[in-house]
Image (cartoon, grey):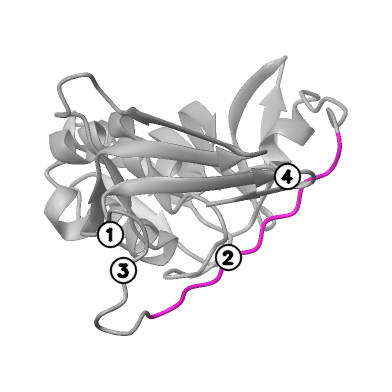
Amino acid sequence: MADAVDVVIAGGGPAGATLAIWLGRAGLRVDLFEARRFPREKPCGEGIMPAGVAVLDRLGLREAVGGRSLAAVRYHGFGLTAESPFSPDGRARALAQRRLRLDDTLLHAARTTPGVRVFEEAPVLGAAVVDGRAVGLQVGGELRRGGLVVGADGLDSPVRRSLGLDVGARGPVRDGVRMHFRLAAARVIGSGDRLEIFIGRGYELY
């Protein structure tokens, strides 16, 4: 059994990696466990809303993440078009960037933060509970203790499931597909700084 750290985190995506960075910068000892090896592709999270962009700014990682700045969102559907800026003064900006780049940047920053240890290809089986309190994470066959246990391990969270916090599915199942296209040099779609969303019966395209 490993010695206890201040915080153990399951999941190295944006939530887990960002939390590890903040905690490490605050002087805490953090162990983060990610089931996969990064960088990896994922079909969601390629649009970062203004609040997320503000977090990247505070972390000092906005330039490292890169991507395309977006000023507004425009909806198309059922014969209508509606548009709104992300803020009335136009200062709030969203960001379009591949999830592969976002994840890789955040996890690298966590890995290089003093006090933070990142373990990839380390699937978490669930939380370890003693006397009704989560005391760590079960990683493989080993208990990794922490003063605070964080489950940032996604939609099918083993941590949430192990604590009996799962709820039944709500509404119909949704599937996500992500594709990237390179446009010809002279080709432009839309204004270039709008998030364009097309809605129809049974689909939503970004």
Kind of residue sitting beneath label 4: Asp
Query: How would you classify the magenta stretch by its main secondary structure?
Result: loop
Question: What secondary structure is found at the residue carrying circle 1?
Answer: helix
Above or below, 165 against 123 in this view is above
Mark 2, secondary structure of its residue: loop
- According to the picture, the residue beneath numbered tag 1 turns out to be 105
* Front: mark 1 or 3: 3
Q: How many angstroms separate mark 1 from mark 3 (CA)? A: 28 Å
Q: Name the N-terminal-most of marks 4 and 2.
A: 4
Q: Which residues are magenta?
A: 172-182
Q: CA distance from mark 3 to mark 4?
A: 38 Å
Which residue shows up at 28% across the image and 51% down it? 110
Q: Within the image, what quadrant is residue 46 found in? A: bottom left
Q: Residue at x 54, y 53 (%)?
A: 44
Query: What amino acid type is highlighted by mark number 3?
Result: Val
Helix, strand or loop for disc 3: loop
